[in-house]
Image (spheres, helix red, strand yellow):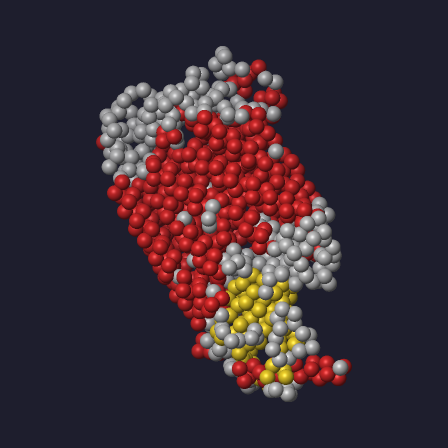
Amino acid sequence: MRLIWSLLFLTVPILGVGLLAMSYLTPGGWLPPNISATGQEIDTLFNYILAVTGIIFVITEVLLVWAMWSSRGHAGGKSFYTHGNTKLEIAWTVGTAAILLFIAFYQIPIWSKAKYYSYRPKGKTPEVLVEASQFLWQLRYPAWNSAEGKPYPLNTLSPDTALSFEQINELHLPAGEPILLHLKSKDVLHSFWIPALRVKQDTVPGNLIPVWFEIDPRQLNDAYLVATPATPLKVGDEVFTQLWQFEWTCAELCGWGHSMMRARLIIHPNRADYERWLRASSKDWLENHQAAR
Amino acid sequence: MAEAHETHAAHDHGHDLPFWRKYIFSVDHKVIGIQFLFTSLFFLIIGGLLAGAIRYQLAYPNSKFPILGDLLWANNAGKMTPSDYVMIVTMHASVMIFFVIIPMLTGAFGNFLIPLQIGYKDMAFPTLNMLSYWFMVPAIICIVMSFLSVGGAAGAGWTAYPPLSVIQQASPGSLEGQKWWYLSLLFVGVSSMMGSVNYMTTIINCRAKGMTMFRLPMSTWAMFITAILQAFALPVLTVALIFGLTDNLGWTSFFVPANLDANWIVNSHRRAATGGQPLLWQHLFWFYSHPAVYIMILPAMGMVSDIIACHARKALFGYKPMVYSVACIAGLGFIVWGHHMFMSGMAPGLGTAFMVSTIMIALPSAIKVFNWIFTIWGGNIQFTSAMLNAMSFVAMFIIGGLSGIYMASTPTDIHFHDTYFIVAHIHYVLFGGSLFGFFAAVYHWFPKMFGRMMNERWGKIHFFLTFIFFNLAFYAMHNIGIMGAPRRYMNLQPMITPEQAEVMKTLNLLISHSVFALMGVQVIFYANLFYSLFWGPKAEANPWRCNTLEWQTSSPPPHHNFVTPPVVYHGPYEYGHPDLPDDHLAQTDPREIRDIGHH
């Protein structure tokens, strides 16, 4: 019986490591693709933590099995009589504390870059205002100012509907530069989650929350191309021949339609291409608006 | 049980009471413990069936629900509706946490064990103790009403984040179901508070002669510290629940900000006041609910420590470090709540502070794991069902503890927050930890509770199958969490890439079928328990040859536990002392031993 139980407990580290390794080797079975620079650092941290916890996991589980297997009693069927060992207690307390403190302090810079306000892209106006509501994402872009040849500034606190336009569930952004977005919610909590960017931030009604990131053009793989010269995207008179697409979604329970709150991220290769899209998309709307005025 | 009561000592007044005073409105802590036990066993079935419904939907999205589909969702072609899915998810967690884990650990075993282990006739306040159980009854009525009410059960998650939970139009379940949910939790809270005051008073004041604090068994230590946690954390939850309830009724707006888009949610602006903050609820809720996860694991840790020492026939390794670790977990447990809110919009600098405190809470947990392993090491293990479940607690808690580091680390939490990784983590702690600890405790203390033995062979078969299916069911949730599967989604297809969708499908089928098997296997446990209750072989006073006081009286104990008040001479873990002919020394045994066990 001792053998059966020891083997049963031994399956935990073996299958645990095995299943993770199998997942790692299966296409699509591991972390989602990453296209951001900060995301790269997060993934590296994940790998470090995986290595540290993996080693501790295997060592402690094997120790447990070894203790089970070897504990057969001493002379007269008695156990080894001890109430503990102070040196051993101090050793594993100090050792564990050192590992944990290292993990804790090692990661602070990565978190700061992702979230601390002092690391936000400076001198930038928000690219898009993301407004979440049950159960869709309204993405408000600045309209194109043809007189000055640039978009109108986007007022995210109280958007001027004359100077901005809206798209549903389709977030267009340029690659290769820091991007600042502002998040809002119209009703309940939602969470703005783009897995491929390692970006997640709840949207809170009553609060305006900034997020920032940079799409690394070198990470944009052909597998995610949605527009090519053969299958271009046409907006008005403009034709787009190189766009990448990633799915993103809501990560905070927001009601019955929570699992339907999915959206797409469309990436333009550079700002010029993105602004061409911005111009084309706001053109019809602007003309109508000016005609009405 | 009736026969056992006839053998009571002559001065015992228990048999004078009418049936309804003895078994229903009883003030006897043992009966109250057993009442909590059966209540939580009943709700374990409910919670389990809800889990089965969730897993069926995830394995076979968009297909007709078996058996009940036509009955429940006739106008949706027998398929589960999206609003019912979030209600089922909400109620699975609420039932399992507030009606299963907390009552089965602190309610059932806290009540049953504390007076017996400290050598006293009952709790300090027996009537208050009875009320603590009877306050569960309105809680049960309210949670059942939540299922039956207009709009369906509460559907805002067990965390009930506002505004979803307090704006009635935000979800069908927020109409009536959510109000019943708030009321139900208020009653559970009052019940727990009564228990906690009683536990603290009893342990501080009612210990037998010679029972110093550092001679208390770990079970009682853990219950003591859990009671302190409850006493300090519960008032905050109570306040939050009352705020939530009045917000839901439209009287107040603690959690509802001004300027909600009135067109979006009809009537949301019709409130007595505006200008609340949704994050306030999260702070108040987690200030209770993070300590609550320790309320759900510390008693199991304590009981597992006692069970491992007894069945390994070995003194607990590092008794004092174990006590200090529990105290340290409880202390740190009050300053880590913000780790649930890293992505909530809370100040990121505060996130860093909560990250450091959260990572450091792994330290006392690790110390406990090492001490358990070294308690087993060098022992003379008896492979009983109780011991196997207790060792499994340790093995699973290692996984649950280590996987917590991924969420405690703020940068990796950006990816893992609200994915299946956290679902895997919480189930490794609450099922792998608390529930295996509960199984161990039932196998171990059943003879003392009911005077009969449970069947060991079926106990081991139950353990073997539960262990396998539990791991198959929950380990793969880590994998789909890494892949980015969001929690509380009724359909995990499609994912970012087609390959991901394929892997996800396979793993979801594996998880769901393992959960179905895991549920089926629990029939063995229930059958064993109920069969043994009536037909199990009679138990001796001390079938496992334990040292602690509850085993030094008859099984089951008489009405006032001990025929003569016990006197304590030793700590609870004197197993295998080389000078003694036997391998254990009861705490009441007056023989002196050499103090040679400290290295």
Residue A237 visible in image: yes
Q: In this view, does A159 lie above or below B70?
A: below
User: Is A221 displayed left or right of B306 in the figure?
Assistant: right
In the rendering, at what x and y percent does residue A88 appear? 27, 43
User: Is B359 displayed left or right of A173 in the figure?
Assistant: left
**Which residue is depicted at the point 44% across and 64% down?**
A112
User: Is B170 displayed left or right of B401 in the figure?
Assistant: right
Q: In this view, does B34 lie above or below B44?
A: above
Q: In which quarter of the image is residue B18?
A: top right
**Which residue is depicted at the point 54% across and 85% down?**
A272
**Which residue is depicted at the point 71% across and 59% down?**
B265
In the rendering, at what x and y percent does residue A73 appear? 27, 34
**Which residue is depicted at the point 40% across and 25% down?**
B549
Q: How many labels does the image show?
A: 0
Quadrant including the C terminus of chain B = top left
Q: In which quarter of the image is residue B394?
A: top left
Of B332 and B113, nearer the camera is B332
Residue B52 visible in image: no
In the rendering, at what x and y percent does residue B56 appear? 58, 53
Residue at far top of view: B10
Residue at far right of view: A292
Of B46 and A125, nearer the camera is A125
Q: In this view, does B3 lie above or below B178?
A: above
In the rendering, at what x and y percent does residue B405 appear? 42, 54
